[in-house]
Amino acid sequence: AGLGNPGRPYEHTRHNAGFMALDKLAARCGIDITEHAHKALIGKGFIEGSRVLLVKPQTFMNASGESIRSVMDYYKAEPGQLIVIYDDISLEPGMLRVRGKGSAGGHNGIKSIIACLGSQDFPRIRIGVGAKPERMDLADYVLGHFSRDELERMDTAFTDGAAAAVSMITEGISAAMNHFNGAARKPKPETTGQKEE
């Protein structure tokens, strides 16, 4: 699941980093995220032979858990089978952080998912969008659009976020953490090779 807000006004905003990374994953795997179900846009397909469901909740960020819970109940999925991709203001722009579980860290979309699932034991990929300027309102910042320069850097992060999701599915969370956690990435030969598979 990639988190974000639906609608054209929210396209390319910081809070929609999860949507943008999921779009990269969908393009990479040839999956169309166009079916309406479970208060979400969903796409069904395979990643390296594993059946997957790509989900973009359409409930707006603060109610993301309603959609995720509906999907999980319908498919009888456990929290450990869920990977959530979302923006994080505590990481510098373009930095990735893969985790197997954890708290919401102040992110309202993750708070909603934890509340609706009754568990915080689900893997996640956090994509850094940078801290807000000192005098700026947090909502204004996360709902603000990336600049053209930022989008170039973030485009790499979204591609890496998609690759991290594939790595989590095919190699496991520990391997994905080793590959993708750390500073905002410059392209690395070993990762590039993996992307071309």
Image (spheres, rainbow, N blue to C red):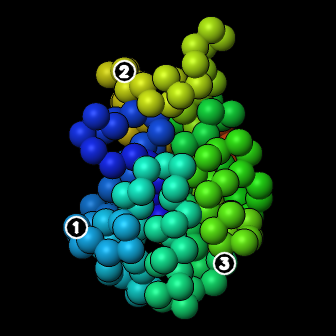
Residue type at tag 1: Thr
Q: Residue at x 64, y 45 (%)?
A: 107
The answer to whether the residues at label 2 and label 1 have Cβ atoms under 8 Å apart is no
User: Residue sitting at 62 percent across and 8 percent down?
Assistant: 135
Q: Secondary structure at mark 1?
A: loop
Is 101 rendered above or below residue 105?
below
User: In terms of depth relative to the viewer, which is nearer, 185 or 61?
Assistant: 61
* Disc 3, SS: helix
Q: Is residue 91 visible?
A: yes
Query: Considering only vertical position in the picture, is 176 above or below 159?
Result: below
The disc, 2 or 3, on the residue closer to the chain's N-terminal end is: 3
Gap between marks 2 and 1 measured at Cα = 27 Å
The x and y percentages for residue 8 are 24, 40
Mark 2 to mark 3 CA distance (whole Å)? 35 Å
According to the picture, the residue beneath numbered tag 2 turns out to be 147
Q: Crowdedness of circle 1 by 10 Å Cα count: few (<14), some, many (20+)?
A: some
Residue 4 position within the rendered picture, expressed as x and y whole percent measured from the top left:
43, 48
Q: Which residue does the numbered mark 1 point to in the structure image? A: 34
